[in-house]
Amino acid sequence: MNKLFEKYKEMMFKISSYELALRTASLDAQVIAPSKGSNYRNERLSYLEGELYSLQTDEEFFKLINELINCEELDEQNKSILKWQLKDLKKKRCLPKQFCIDFSKLQMESQQNWEKAKQNNDYKIFEPYLREIIAKTKEIIKYRQNELSGYDILLDDYEPGMDQNKYDVFFVQIKEKIVPLIHKISQTKQIDDSFIFNKYPIEQQKELMNKILNYIGFDFDAGVLMESEHPFTDSLSKYDTRITTHYYENNLISSIYSVIHEAGHANYYYSIRDDIATTYCYDNMSSGMHESQSRLFENYLGRNYHFWDSLFPQMKQLFPEQLKSIEQIDFVRAANKSIPSLIRTEADELTYPLHILIRYEIEKGLFNDSIDPKNLEEIWNAKYKEYLGLTVENASDGILQDVHWSDGSFGYFPTYALGSSYAAQFMHYLNKDVNVDECLANNQFYVIKDWLAQHIHQYGGLYLPEKQIEIACGEKFNPQYYIDYLLQKYSQLYNL
Ligand code: ZN
């Protein structure tokens, strides 16, 4: 057994070396690399991708993992890690090589045409590619048919254990409870957040981000903040995580909340136990679990009044003119304002899940054949009218706004709403053990992080999300916490 396991570890070292090189290069391309060098880069990187693919899907390696899983002497933790790896390997191996090559070419073309369509505000440019991507994804589903079928296969890719039945129950509650509240708010006096859109020089914003990250206890020896078009987090290893943001001179809170959000993702990696941090389960957490940690930071902590007790005076020093007549409470109320809007990524905490509901209903319809891709734009627009009361004037602010469908990432969107809901449940139990308001007010953010590390982060992706929730909370996933949180918070905020 020892020999087999040593051989496996050798292979994993080789694989992770390729992965490190590729991820570093991909990060570089997203934040700093000059565009004219992209052809040369892409050609070499796709060669390396091919090499990595061969290593990962190698027949001997596949057999080795199978053998180890059946090996009696191997401990349970390592067996679980190998089972996750095997599950993902099987997904890769069941597709014919030629199909993968064709699909990856289609993905690139589709993304390019999505970009073009968005720039030209013309859905017709993208439509044929989207139809092809949907058709090919249906073929993938056929290749992969196992215990799961149809759209459930895609949902399980991003959130193992979730399926349409479970999501239906979740989204029905959102629809029934949240839509009426949004309507009520639309008839009441809105919060004035106009000062958010004053001019905030980027140099001072950068100083502010350092202060925020220091307050959170971000380890600058194990992570770095950079800039990119769209904010993201990528971790090369436990002590090497990169987060990015995008600064807008005319928006004070955009960079603030993207940095807090990404710091939540980074913190997850940072607290994974050492015996898991160099294994496959370092970076296989479900999308919903990961998003629960970033949204917990961003919304449940970052939009809490006390998060700003020590930071707000510092922010005022950085922007004395812009915030002259603004008090901490004005800032926090503005940061929590809720108003229906067309763009998902700019949506507030309350209207956000409806953007997701719309995408979920459409994806479900596409893969259950109740929606013809031909009518997609009309369906999209009708749903925005129905759920958010908004008229979509142009496709760029409508069906063309997200990149996800252009490369076939179907099944991903629902995890965004699910993650917020997991976070509400975690917050409920965190509050039982820890006085969160007091910790935030007294600069004891580490107490909160310790709780998260102990109850969630240390395990990495070792457990199914449903099991991880039970470990952290001592009960099953329950979306009621999320609904209650939203109802209570926004009724209070708007005096309803
Ligand atoms: Zn995120």
Image (cartoon, helix red, strand yellow):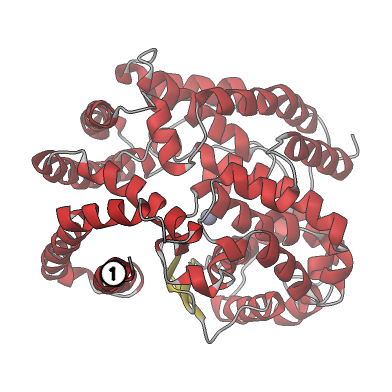
Residue reaching furthest to the bottom: 221
**Res 41 visible:** yes
Q: Position of residue 437 (x, y in %)?
A: 87, 63
Kindly identify the residue that appears in the image at 18 percent across and 46 percent down: 104
Type of the residue with mark 1: Ala
The residue nearer to you, when weighing 154 against 348, is: 154
In the rendering, at what x and y percent does residue 118 appear? 33, 42
Q: Quadrant of the C terminus?
A: top right
Q: In the image, what residue occupies the spot 85% across and 39% down?
A: 488
x, y percentage for residue 473?
74, 49
Tag 1 residue: 29
Quadrant assignment for the N terminus: bottom left
Give residue 78's quadrant in the image: bottom left
Camera-nearest residue between 480 and 385: 480
Q: Is residue 393 above or below residue 41?
A: above
* Neighbours of disc 1 within 10 Å: few (<14), some (14-19), many (20+): some
Depth order, front residue of 355/197: 355
Q: Quadrant of residue 317?
A: bottom right
Q: Is residue 439 left or right of residue 258?
A: right
Q: At numbered mark 1, what does the secondary structure look like: helix, strand or loop? A: helix
Left or right of 256? Residue 5 is left
Q: Compare residues 351 and 439 and report the one nearer the observer.
A: 439
Give residue 388's quadrant in the image: top right
From where the camera sits, is residue 348 visible? no
